[in-house]
Image (tube, helix red, strand yellow):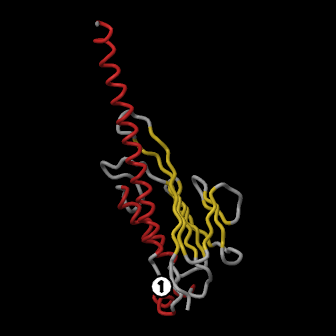
Amino acid sequence: MILLIIFLPLLIFATVYSVTTTQSVTTYDVDVQKAVEIAARAAAQQVTEDSQANGTPRIHTANAHAIFRQELARNLGLNETDLTPLNGSAIKQPDYTVIIYNVDDTFSTSGAELARKYVFSGGSLTSSALNPAGNPTSFVVTDTDINIDSSGTIKTTLDKPGVIAVVNADLNRAVGTDQVNISRWIAVRLHYITP
């Protein structure tokens, strides 16, 4: 009876701790995936007016990146300027890579470049133009990067304009002081009927 009195509170504490930790990590994990989805879909909707009027929508690359970053910050509780966490946010400053891909550069004069890669890492943003050879184009996604036609286990192919994004971040646990690193990605493409 004495052993039961001593070990029962420890057993209850261990059970509550493990359930709370699992639940908090799972909840934050779902939040990050949903935030990446919302941001990528919003980015893909940044179609230039002239391409839309022509019936062949193309994504404005700079506007797509700006809205991706804005929506990611808004949905994860981050400052829109530097993506640092706001009070109450469970996520540390994330790193991300996003590629805005158009199948051609027909509407590049209106901002729809063929393909542009934006990398936000360690608080710094870089961007570079990509020149995929032909359409469709295959992309390989890792935990921290997206590349064209390289080897890897996660591969996605775009045959229409789209956005591919990967976000890597550290999450605070609800219980304890350690952090969990997660990486979530998504590929979104425009659906339209070619004339």
Q: Quadrant of residue 106?
A: bottom right
The answer to which of 109 and 163 lies nearer the viewer is 163
The residue positioned 47% from the left and 67% from the top of the image is 40
- The spot of residue 54 in percent (x, y) is 51, 93
- The 10 Å Cα crowd at callout 1, few under 14, some 14 to 19, many 20 or more, is many
The residue positioned 71% from the left and 58% from the top of the image is 151
- The spot of residue 135 in percent (x, y) is 67, 78
Under tag 1, what secondary structure? loop
The answer to which of 9 and 164 lies nearer the viewer is 9
Q: Could you tell whether 43 is left or right of 15 in the image?
A: right
The quadrant of the image that shows the C terminus is bottom right
Q: Residue furthest front?
A: 1
Q: Could you tell whether 26 is left or right of 132 in the image?
A: left
Q: Which residue is mark 1?
A: 48
The residue positioned 45% from the left and 70% from the top of the image is 41
Q: Is residue 55 above or below residue 125?
A: below
Q: Quadrant of residue 128?
A: bottom right
Q: Residue furthest top?
A: 2
Q: Is residue 66 above or below residue 80?
A: below
The residue positioned 39% from the left and 65% from the top of the image is 71
- The spot of residue 170 in percent (x, y) is 46, 46
Give, as a three-letter code, the residue at label 1. Thr
Q: Could you tell whether 21 is left or right of 184 in the image?
A: left
The answer to which of 97 and 135 lies nearer the viewer is 135
- The spot of residue 7 in percent (x, y) is 34, 14
Q: Could you tell whether 71 is left or right of 169 in the image?
A: left
Q: Is residue 94 above or below residue 102?
A: above
The quadrant of the image that shows the N terminus is top left
